[in-house]
């Protein structure tokens, strides 16, 4: 029965990916601008235009192009880039993927490792005045825009202290240490705004859980307070926090677009902006589809984590 539930979620994710692919394709096909004229110019030779249009597959009807694109997707082929003619879209995404992946995963690890203990400490001491101040301070932390935090960190660590580079220069093969140093400020920028957010949600959730009947029963049985928080309150509080962590993961996948451009890092964010500025539709479609697929995959993983942490959710799914 449990396997059947996961299969239903898997097939619903496949249907969602198909619908998203259709929306992405139609959206970019409806945008103004002709890729052929962008490459050849407005006053180009009509013969060259027709030849290039045939090479790019733009002379076929819309529905044929869509199903051809879907068939290519099934084979893992996102087509050829218009602006980077010697590279496929998959090759371009692979060349920029590592930078974005390291920023996203490193930030997520820092957020989880820092915010869960911090949120637990705040919840245990929420009546203490000092911790009330920290809670207010955490609210200010996640209210500050990431790009403003990036500018402040660049000013402190790059211009004043001269410890870290201002702009990113990533070449993992030749300069691995320099490449890692280039990613410290972007990771720190994203972490600063997300650690207070998760700890704030976890703190509120744990405070709410601590006032429920099962906690009073556990205390009446003589259980240790730390044991109650660890085995009962924290476990039940993680249900609501998982949603926030999922949202943060989605934000990190999309939010790195802004941060990568602020720090001039060669990641998927800067590649997406280059594709938009050059009207490179296959490249932009490929990156947007990758982001959409990542979001759907994260939501699928979150659903599985729900059922693992709280078996009652799995039982409700079996009843349906």
Image (tube, grey):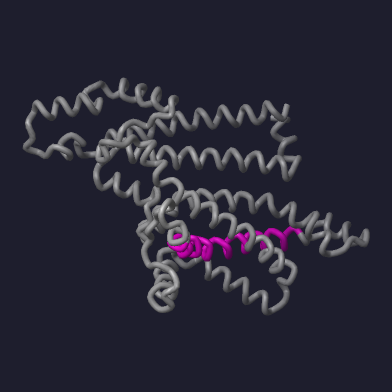
Locate residue 207, reporting x and y percent.
72, 63
Residue at the front extreme?
Answer: 174
Q: Which residues are magenta?
A: 181-209
In the rendered image, the vertical position of residue 71 relative to residue 104, given as above or below: above
Locate residue 32, reporting x and y percent.
22, 39
Quadrant the N terminus occupies: top right
Q: Main secondary structure of the magenta part?
A: helix
Q: Quadrant of residue 298?
A: top right
Q: Is residue 73 left or right of residue 201?
A: left
> Is 198 covered by the magenta stretch?
yes
Quadrant the C terminus occupies: top right
In the rendered image, the vertical position of residue 256 relative to residue 22, given as above or below: below
Of residue 109 and residue 42, the one placed in the foreground of this image is: 109
In the rendered image, the vertical position of residue 302 relative to residue 175, given as above or below: above
Q: Is residue 169 left or right of residue 82?
A: right
Locate residue 265, reporting x and y percent.
38, 56
- Badge count: 0
Locate residue 272, reporting x and y percent.
34, 46
Q: Quadrant of residue 174?
A: bottom left
Q: Residue at x 50, y 41 (%)?
A: 294
């Amino acid at each position: 029965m449990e396997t059947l539930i996961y299969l239903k979620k898997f097939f619903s994710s496949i249907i969602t990916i198909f619908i998203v692919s259709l929306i992405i394709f139609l959206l970019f096909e409806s945008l103004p601008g002709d890729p052929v004229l962008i490459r050849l110019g407005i006053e180009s030779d009509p013969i060259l235009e027709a030849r290039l249009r045939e090479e790019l597959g733009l002379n076929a009807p819309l529905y044929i192009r869509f199903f051809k694109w879907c068939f290519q997707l099934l084979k893992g082929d996102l087509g050829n880039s218009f602006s980077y003619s010697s590279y496929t879209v998959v090759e371009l995404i692979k060349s920029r993927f590592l930078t974005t992946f390291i920023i996203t995963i490193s930030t997520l690890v820092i957020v989880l490792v820092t915010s869960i203990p911090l949120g637990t400490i705040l919840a245990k001491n929420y009546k203490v005045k000092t911790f009330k101040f920290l809670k207010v301070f955490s609210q200010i932390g996640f209210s500050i825009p990431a790009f403003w935090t990036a500018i402040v960190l660049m000013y402190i660590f790059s211009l004043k202290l001269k410890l870290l580079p201002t702009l990113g220069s990533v070449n993992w093969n030749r300069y691995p240490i320099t490449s890692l140093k280039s990613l410290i400020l972007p990771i720190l920028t994203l972490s600063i705004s997300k650690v207070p957010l998760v700890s704030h949600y976890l703190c509120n959730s744990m405070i709410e859980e601590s006032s429920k009947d099962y906690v009073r029963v556990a205390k009446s049985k003589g259980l240790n307070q730390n044991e109650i928080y660890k085995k009962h309150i924290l476990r039940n509080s993680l249900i609501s926090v998982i949603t926030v962590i999922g949202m943060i993961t989605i934000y990190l996948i999309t939010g790195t677009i802004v941060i990568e451009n602020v720090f001039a890092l060669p990641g998927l964010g800067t590649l997406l902006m280059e594709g938009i500025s050059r009207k490179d539709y296959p490249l932009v479609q490929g990156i947007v589809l990758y982001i959409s697929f990542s979001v759907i995959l994260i939501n699928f993983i979150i659903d599985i984590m729900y059922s693992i942490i709280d078996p009652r959710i799995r039982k409700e799914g079996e009843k349906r």
